[in-house]
Image (tube, helix red, strand yellow):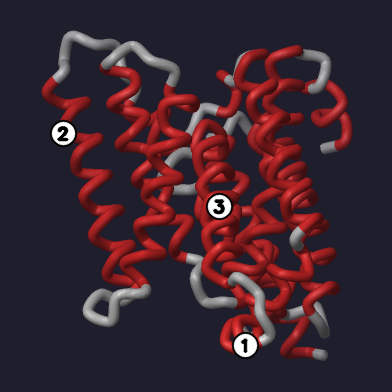
């Protein structure tokens, strides 16, 4: 496996995909920990479907999918928050409505525009090896933004993660920080969709944080362990997909699933 890892990094297109994947894995673990602990992890799944719909529209209009999708997915994330505050529509229902509608819209547009050369599987399941230099630069910039904002606001995010009512009582602008957290999640989803696809990117946000819950004793340990698991599972999954000529996104997700099962077993034995 080590020889496969060293061999694949000799190719520039694989090296670009590897670097982009590491960036997404780190960002996903940071934001995913807060979302999982707040029981809002499905927001990533909903936003990934919105990203799929917007990317389909961008491709049909011959626009850059990532740049076109970012503002749309951010608006969708904010809309989910606003709907979640409405007592008549809970968060799960809001996510279900947006995700189903966006996925249906994207599939419909791709189906009716038969004259355009659109690979549906690339949007649904990702095409990490097709990441170009421009995609890597955008990924690095957005990754830096996500990590920098998270580190600057880590105490506020910690507060709203565990007791939002208390955080609001002591004067924190909880609505603002909730919006920022949703925007960061939207950025990760848009960039990550290029790697794992709309159907799989949410797993990179959820799985490492769930695995870390079985190993950690506090919030900070959860963050660190989640980061380690996310990066390690990506490297293993990426290498195995190259060694066995398997779909990269699916292999990474299955690696995270195996890690989650192992962490659960370890927790039970401990």
Q: Do labels 1 and 2 touch, CB within 8 Å?
A: no
Instruction: Residue 187 in the image: state x and y as whole percent.
Output: 56, 42
Within 10 Å of disc 3 (Cα), the crowding (few <14, some 14-19, many 20+) is: many
Q: Nearer the viewer, residue 102 or 247?
A: 102
Image point 21% across, 49% down: which residue?
101
Tell me: 47 left or right of 241: left
Residue 248 visible? The answer is yes
Q: Nearer the viewer, mark 2 or mark 3?
A: 3
Lower sequence index among marks 1 and 2:
2
Which quadrant holds the C terminus? bottom right
Q: Which residue is mark 2?
A: 108
State how far apart marks 1 and 2 are (Cα).
Answer: 46 Å
Q: Element at badge 2? A: helix
The picture quadrant where one finds residue 83 is bottom left
Q: Residues within 10 Å of mark 1 (few under 14, many from 20)?
A: few
Q: Where is residue 233 drawn, in percent x and y? A: 73, 51
Q: Which mark is residue 185?
A: 3
- State left or right for residue 231 relative to residue 245: right
Label 2 neighbour load within 10 Å: few <14, some 14-19, many 20+: few
Q: Residue at x 49, y 71 (%)?
A: 40
* x and y, in percent, of residue 11 in the image: 76, 13
**Which numbered disc, 3 or 1, marks the residue that appears first in the sequence?**
1
Residue at the spot 75% in from the left edge and 85% down from the top edge: 267
Q: CA distance from mark 2 to mark 3?
A: 26 Å
Asked whether residue 26 appears in the rendered view, the answer is: no
Res 169 label = 1
Report the side of 259 relative to 193 (left or right): right
The Cα–Cα distance between marks 3 and 1, rounded to whole angstroms, is: 25 Å
Numbered circle sitting on residue 118:
none
Position of the N terminus, as image quadrant, is top right
């Amino acid at each position: 496996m080590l020889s496969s890892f060293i061999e694949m990094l000799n190719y520039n297109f694989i090296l670009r995909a590897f670097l982009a994947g590491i960036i997404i894995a780190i960002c996903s673990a940071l934001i995913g920990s807060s979302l999982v602990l707040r029981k809002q992890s499905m927001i990533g799944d909903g936003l990934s479907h919105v990203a799929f719909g917007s990317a389909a529209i961008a491709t049909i209009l011959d626009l850059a999918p990532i740049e076109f999708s970012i503002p749309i997915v951010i608006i969708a994330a904010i809309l989910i928050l606003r709907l979640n505050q409405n007592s008549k529509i809970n968060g799960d229902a809001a996510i279900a409505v947006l995700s189903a509608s966006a996925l249906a819209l994207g599939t419909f547009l791709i189906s009716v525009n038969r004259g355009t050369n659109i690979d549906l599987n690339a949007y649904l399941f990702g095409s990490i090896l097709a990441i170009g230099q421009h995609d890597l630069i955008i990924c690095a910039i957005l990754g830096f933004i996500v990590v920098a904002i998270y580190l600057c606001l880590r105490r506020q995010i910690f507060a709203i993660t565990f007791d939002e009512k208390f955080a609001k009582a002591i004067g924190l602008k909880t609505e603002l920080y909730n919006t920022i957290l949703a925007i960061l999640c939207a950025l990760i989803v848009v960039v990550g969709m290029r790697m794992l696809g709309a159907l799989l990117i949410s797993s990179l946000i959820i799985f490492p944080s769930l695995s870390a819950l079985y190993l950690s004793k506090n919030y900070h340990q959860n963050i660190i362990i989640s980061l380690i698991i996310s990066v390690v599972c990506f490297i293993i999954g990426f290498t195995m997909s190259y060694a066995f000529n398997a779909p990269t996104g699916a292999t990474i997700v299955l690696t995270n699933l195996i890690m989650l099962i192992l962490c659960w077993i370890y927790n039970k034995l401990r």
